Image (cartoon, rainbow, N blue to C red):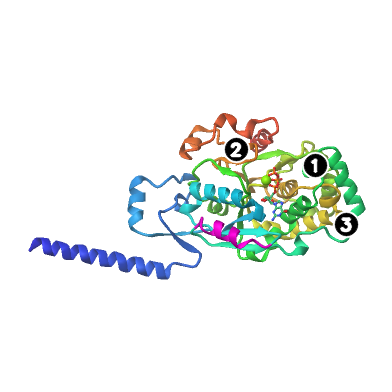
Amino acid sequence: MAWTRHVRYVLLACLLVLAYQYLTSIYAPAGSHTIDYLPESSSSDPSKSSLPSQSQQHQCEHSDTTYELANATFVMLVRNSDLEGTISSIRALEDRFNSRFGYPYVLLNNEPFTEEFKRRVSVLVRSKIEFGLIPKEHWSQPDWIDEENAAKARKQMIATNVKYGGSVSYRNMCRFNSGFFYRHELLQKYKWYWRVEPNVKFYCDIHLDPFRYMEENNKIYGFTITVYEISATIRTLWSIVTEFVERYPEYIATDNAMGFISDDHGKTYNRCHFWSNFEIANMDFWRGEAYTAFFEHLDSKGGFYYERWGDAPVHSIAAALFLKRDQIHFFDEIGYQHDDWGHCPIPDEIWEKGRCSCSQKGSFDYDLSSCKPRWDRFVNS
Ligand SMILES: Nc1nc2c(ncn2[C@@H]2O[C@H](COP(=O)(O)OP(=O)(O)OP(=O)(O)O)[C@@H](O)[C@H]2O)c(=O)[nH]1
Ligand SMILES: [Mg+2]
């Protein structure tokens, strides 16, 4: 009868679909990852990508699609006491981006993570999550630092109310983020990272895979917020950078972004830096010859302890000097909040496409403390 033939065809079709899914799951290439639906950046031109249409989503729910993830991970440096803030950041990131992609996480701590911490965080994500301990030598004031001088600087910063001015552990953290995180054994297998802090917010759906975007567009360093550094924390930093530039002119990129961080062709630093609590970047840049020499030069001067150099100006100055200006990328579509300052996309089409929950009027971009207007002038110059 016609209907039994019809049933046979349907069964045969189902069998073929199952066999296909089985074979593709076995032969998926290393580094590729099966996800619920095809992220837009699988198109050859990521700038033209858009959310899959309802019909694509529907179709993809029924047929697995393999998507090649970048060689990338999230990195979080956190304490056991940051548990709730860590959960909140990961939850936001998963909701707005990663539940559709499945990038892994590496969490680092200068003390062993508790079992409770690992359990509460691991349950949040389907992707791989690893917990690492930072070696002591990457997280301590070196012996050759003159403690008397360092203590004097801390005392003075306390007296003048410099944020974290009296803290040695904050200085260890800044030095670690400047010169060591990318050397951690758990990060060796990765090229790209996205730095995430506890208690940050992500306001918009992130449709485009930022890692793939960076890779496919020859970008090295990505940011969302740029601000002025507190002068008291970097008194001698620029003169030491200038010394480096004079000694190693070969590391300075042609067509670099010096014009963004200096208003007088390098004579002085205007204190603009990319806020490093959010960073999407290529770790091979930090691992490379120019930055390695740069970090060693800075570290040898002791300013992480005699002053309070932050990893943000250190990274930003390096990116501005050793990269071509168009290798630095502003992620307008990533609505993001850290403490009191947040970036909300100003262009309506980006804000609407991201279904952003932030107020465009409240965006830090055009605040007096923001360097974004300078960045805009620089890129349009
Ligand atoms: N494991 C560990 N992580 C730390 C320590 N101090 C800071 N961190 C982490 O380092 C990052 C930066 O520290 P924050 O205290 O947020 O510093 P900040 O962003 O300059 O300042 P805030 O405005 O307070 O956020 C965060 O991811 C912290 O969780 C520490 O002593 N141990
Ligand atoms: Mg912070």
x then y, percent, for residue 258? 74, 43
The residue positioned 61% from the left and 65% from the top of the image is 189
Foreground tag (3 vs 1): 3
Q: Is mark 2 within 8 Å of ligand 2?
A: no
User: Residue 134 or 360: which is nearer the viewer?
Assistant: 134
Q: Quadrant of the C terminus?
A: top right
- Residue beneath label 3, please? 145
- Residue beneath label 2, please? 343
Foreground tag (1 vs 2): 2
Note whether residue 216 is visible. Answer: yes
Residue 123 lies in magenta, yes or no?
Answer: yes
Say whether disc 3 or disc 1 marks the residue closer to the N-terminus.
3
Q: Are marks 1 and 2 in contact (CB under 8 Å)?
A: no
x then y, percent, for residue 206? 50, 45
Instruction: Tell me which amino acid carries mark 3.
Output: Ile
Q: Secondary structure at mark 3?
A: loop
Which numbered marker is on residue 266?
Answer: 1
Label 2: few (<14), some (14–19) or many (≥20) C-alpha neighbours in 10 Å? many
Which residue range is magenta in the image? 112-125
Residue 109 found in image quarter: bottom right
Which numbered marker is on residue 293?
Answer: none
The residue positioned 82% from the left and 56% from the top of the image is 299
Residue 17 lies in magenta, yes or no?
Answer: no
Q: Is residue 198 left or right of residue 91?
A: right
Distance CA(mark 2)–CA(mark 3):
38 Å
Q: Secondary structure at mark 1?
A: loop
Measured along the vertical axis of the image, is residue 320 above or below residue 191?
above
